[in-house]
Image: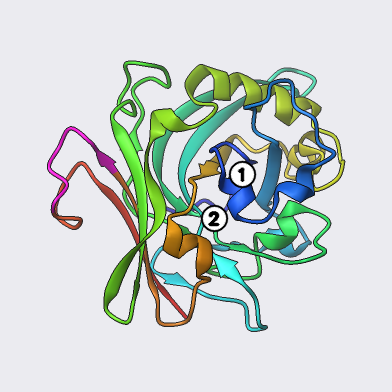
Amino acid sequence: MQLKNVIGLGVAGNFAHHLEQAGELKDFENVTTAHPDAPKGIFPFYLPHSSTFLGCYAIGTDILNLPEYEANAQMEPEIAILFDILYDKNHHVIDLKAQKFTTFNDCTIRKEGAKKISEKKSWGENSKGIAKKWIEIDKFEEGGVMDDYHLCSFVRRDGILHPYGVDAPLLGYSYFYTTLKSWLIETMNTQKDFGPLENIAMLLEEANYPNQALISIGATAYATFGEHHYLERGDEVYVIAYDARCDTNNINENHTKIILHQKVQ
């Protein structure tokens, strides 16, 4: 699925312990939130038609390209949701309608001295990953199709499959469903250019007020291997969403699963 006319946004700090493990908590030390468990903010990873580095369509499906320069890159296993954006006459976001979801690798460089989150998020084609399969969202609230899904991730290195992120229920996101949607709408309208964050309303204007947004809603905490190992060329990465009510023994053959599989090069 091509998403070249869809703005790409991510949510920072929506899963307990991820920012601490990623070494990025200090980036947000001056960012205050309304509630202790609230996400830290929204960042862009793709801006359609932009003349900046974020205008490069970085989302791939089968290949993950590491930077040509030496860099510490970690997989960030996430759920991505395609939202329709509704604006009022003044171009304020007034609603987000969740259409479908899939798995996403918001691969990130652990880069010292980066002023903005976005500087760690995109370095060229295939620097992100998205699964080919999507699941339609019947309702983005409790009782909907997403209730029973879990998210897990693995890296295969030298023939050995290592858990990379912890296996977590989607209901384990700090903000989810109506709470997340309300927070997204408010933050898209009000977030200022401050610290590691950027003015999202201004970016929407620069993108000519796109009708849709692909929003990655936050990375899970890392398993031991993921916390202590950066990605290497030759690795294979898997980000998997699965219905916990179904058989999970075979990661390749269950129709209830969404599997992102990328080869790192």
Q: Main secondary structure of the magenta part?
A: loop
**Between marks 2 and 1, how big is the CA–CA gap?**
8 Å
Report the disc number at residue 92: none
Residue 179: percent from left, percent from top: 56, 19
Read off the residue under disc 1.
10
User: Considering only vertical position in the picture, is 219 above or below 260?
Assistant: above
**Residue located 76% across and 38% down the image:** 200
- Mark 2 surroundings: few (<14), some (14-19) or many (≥20) residues within 10 A: many
Q: Which residues are magenta?
A: 242-249
Q: Amino acid at mark 1?
A: Gly
Residue 183: percent from left, percent from top: 64, 23
Q: Is label 1 in a helix, a strand or a loop?
A: strand
Which sits in the foreground, 258 or 115? 115
Q: Amino acid at mark 2?
A: Asp
Disc 2 vs disc 1: Cβ atoms closer than 8 Å? yes
Q: Is residue 38 left or right of residue 102?
A: right
Which sits in the foreground, 12 or 200? 12
User: Considering only vertical position in the picture, is 220 above or below 118?
Assistant: above
**Residue located 74% across and 60% down the image:** 119
Residue 143: percent from left, percent from top: 32, 16
Read off the residue under disc 2.
106
Residue 92 seen anywhere in this rendered image of the structure: yes
